[in-house]
Image: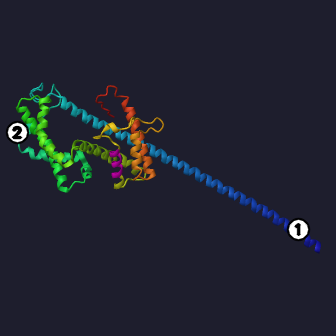
């Protein structure tokens, strides 16, 4: 009887050992299965990140294409303006309808005002709008009192209007358009207005206005191009960040400033990073208001802008106006 019990105990013990081994083996397989699932999830995550990166690259390429298209439109418009400015005026090779050698018809605003005096007020309103387009919100950064700001806008409008009056007087006096005497007449006509503008802005009034015009272009660039890149990446610019980025670009720009203080190679891209000292100055300054993710997007945009400029430059051997069309 005791022997039977001993055998039974031995069998039970052996069964427990086998069961324990089986349980341990199952645990090992379960652990391995979990590790395999984790690895699959990691692979999925990497694949998803790669796909997101590819999507961002495609978005940047699309943005570059949009910027190239915008640049082409601006160049076409600028060339039309240049052609209009170079075309002979009526009486200097233009035919009876005012077209120069079969080109576009040139109509001087002064002639319209002479025939339609009532157009003066309408044109003045257009010029006032033009002031806002030229300088955007840049005039607000001057921190002028409301009455001074309004007066400055009036003076800038008047400067454009007085130029038309001066052209009429110069033409009546028989001065050739564009001649030194003509240019002197234009300056004299605007002398009083220029003095009043100087009184408000100081002795560097022209430089200040040049800087503000450049700032408007930067603001358009941020709003029209960069902002969409930030939004597409899921980190849109706040109004304060957009303003800070524009300010960083304006501070780094030398338009209307003393270029003798500009470092050598300021606009030369580094062959390793693809960025210029000018770009790095913008990025470092903007980093004070942008998140790290936004800084990376800005850096990518700056690099791509340099790439676009380098490619386009290859097709402008003469250095003159070039039109890039789709």
Q: Quadrant of the N terminus?
A: bottom right
Q: In which quarter of the image is the C terminus?
A: top left
Taking the image as shown, residue 156 lies to the left or right of residue 34, namely left
Instruction: Say whether residue 25 is magenta.
Output: no
The nearer-to-camera label among 2 and 1 is 2
What residue did someone put label 1 on? 10
At mark 2, the secondary structure is helix
At mark 1, the secondary structure is helix
Q: Measured from the top left, where is residue 7 in percent x and y? A: 91, 69
191 above or below 181?
Answer: below
Residue at left 32%, top 37%? 259
Q: Measured from the top left, where is residue 19 in percent x and y? A: 79, 64
Residues packed near mark 2 inside 10 Å, few (<14), some (14 to 19) or many (20 plus): few
* Disc number for residue 156: none
Q: Measured from the top left, where is residue 81 in percent x and y? A: 21, 34
Residue at left 29%, top 37%? 73
Q: Quadrant of residue 165?
A: top left
What residue did someone put label 2 on? 115
**Viewer-side residue, 297 vs 255:** 255
Residues packed near mark 1 inside 10 Å, few (<14), some (14 to 19) or many (20 plus): few
Residue 126 visible here: no
**Viewer-side residue, 32 vs 284:** 284
| Dominant SS type (magenta) | helix
6 above or below 269?
Answer: below
What segment is highlighted magenta in the picture?
Answer: 242-251
């Amino acid at each position: 009887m005791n022997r039977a019990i001993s055998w039974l105990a031995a069998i039970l013990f052996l069964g427990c050992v086998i069961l324990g081994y089986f349980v341990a083996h199952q645990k090992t397989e379960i652990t391995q299965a979990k590790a395999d699932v984790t690895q699959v999830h990691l692979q999925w995550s990497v694949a998803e990140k790669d796909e997101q990166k590819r999507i961002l690259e495609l978005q940047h390429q699309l943005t570059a294409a949009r910027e190239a298209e915008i640049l082409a439109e601006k160049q076409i418009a600028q060339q039309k303006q240049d052609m209009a400015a170079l075309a002979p005026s009526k009486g200097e090779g233009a035919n009876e309808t005012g077209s120069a050698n079969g080109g576009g018809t040139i109509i001087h605003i002064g002639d319209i005002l002479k025939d339609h005096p009532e157009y003066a007020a309408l044109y003045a309103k257009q010029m006032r709008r033009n002031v806002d387009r030229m300088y955007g919100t840049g005039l607000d950064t001057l921190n002028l009192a409301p009455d001074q700001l309004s007066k400055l806008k009036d003076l800038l409008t008047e400067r454009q209007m007085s130029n038309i009056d001066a052209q009429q007087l110069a033409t009546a006096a028989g001065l050739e358009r564009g001649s030194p005497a003509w240019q002197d007449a234009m300056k004299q006509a605007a002398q009083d207005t220029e003095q009043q503008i100087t009184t408000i802005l100081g002795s560097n009034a022209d430089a200040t206005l040049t800087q503000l015009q450049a700032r408007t272009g930067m603001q358009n660039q941020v709003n029209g191009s960069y902002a969409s890149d930030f939004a597409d990446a899921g980190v849109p610019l706040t109004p304060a960040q957009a303003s800070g980025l524009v300010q960083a670009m304006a501070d780094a720009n030398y338009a209307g400033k003393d270029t003798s203080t500009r470092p050598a190679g300021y606009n030369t891209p580094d062959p390793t990073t693809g960025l210029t000292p000018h770009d790095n100055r913008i990025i470092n300054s903007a980093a004070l208001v942008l998140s790290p993710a936004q800084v990376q997007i800005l850096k990518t945009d700056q690099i791509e802008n340099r790439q676009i400029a380098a490619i386009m430059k290859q097709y402008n051997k003469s250095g003159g106006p070039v039109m890039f069309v789709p």
